[in-house]
Amino acid sequence: LAIPALPRSPRWLVQQGRLHEALKTLQRFRASEALAKEELDEIVEEQRKARILGDPRWAEMLRGRIGKLLLLGVMLQMLQQLVGMNAIMYFGPRIFASLGQDANKFQTITNAFNFLATIPALFLADRCGRRSLLRHSAAGMVLACLAIAFLGRACLLQATDGTY
């Protein structure tokens, strides 16, 4: 509902040649007109330098530091999906019911734990650093996935026709 009230990006306005509007936008969010003008000058200079360099090529995203950051982002998204939390969130009631448990109770516990675990992560990200938090979280995800796999396998009952 509030998106239409958001101002246009000053960088986008500069790209479109609308410097006066960009300055007005910056003045709304900066402590003084001088700070807004200084930032506008920096944006204009960055745009000038970008024009000199020309349009980037898609292949540039796969090289150097940008390529490593792109690979990291892709891998993090893959790991997030492969962990299977979405499956637990969406199919949790069915999974818990098939294990003979109270589906709603265990789904509520799972959701509450997921929500409550986010709060310390927010504070730890700033205190310990994102890299350290990522490494420890990845190790925790591996352990959790192994625990779910072993518990799931141990709890499966073999049907009379040989299927699980």
Image (tube, rainbow, N blue to C red):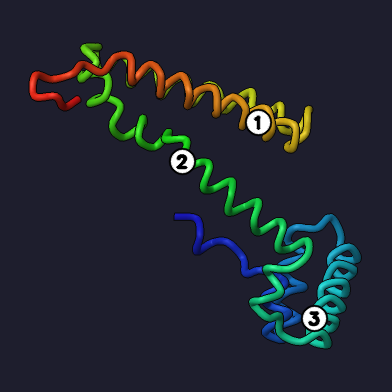
What's the amino acid at mark 1?
Answer: Leu
| Residue pointed to by mark 3 | 50
Residue at the farthest left position: 161
What separation in Å lies between label 2 and label 3 (alpha carbons)? 38 Å
Residues at marks 3 and 1 touching, judged by CB atoms closer than 8 Å: no
Quadrant position of residue 41: bottom right
| Residue pointed to by mark 2 | 82
At a point 86% along the width and 60% down the height, the residue shown is 32
Disc 2 vs disc 3: which is toward the camera?
2
Residue 95's tag is: none
Task: Give how far across and how far down residue 34 sits, in percent.
Answer: 91, 66
Relative depth, front residue between 10 and 150 = 150
What separation in Å lies between label 2 and label 1 (alpha carbons)? 22 Å
Q: If you read the primary sequence from the N terminus, does the residue marked by circle 2 or circle 1 appear first?
A: 2
Task: Give how far across and how far down residue 65 sits, in percent.
Answer: 78, 61
| Residue pointed to by mark 1 | 122
What's the amino acid at mark 2?
Answer: Leu
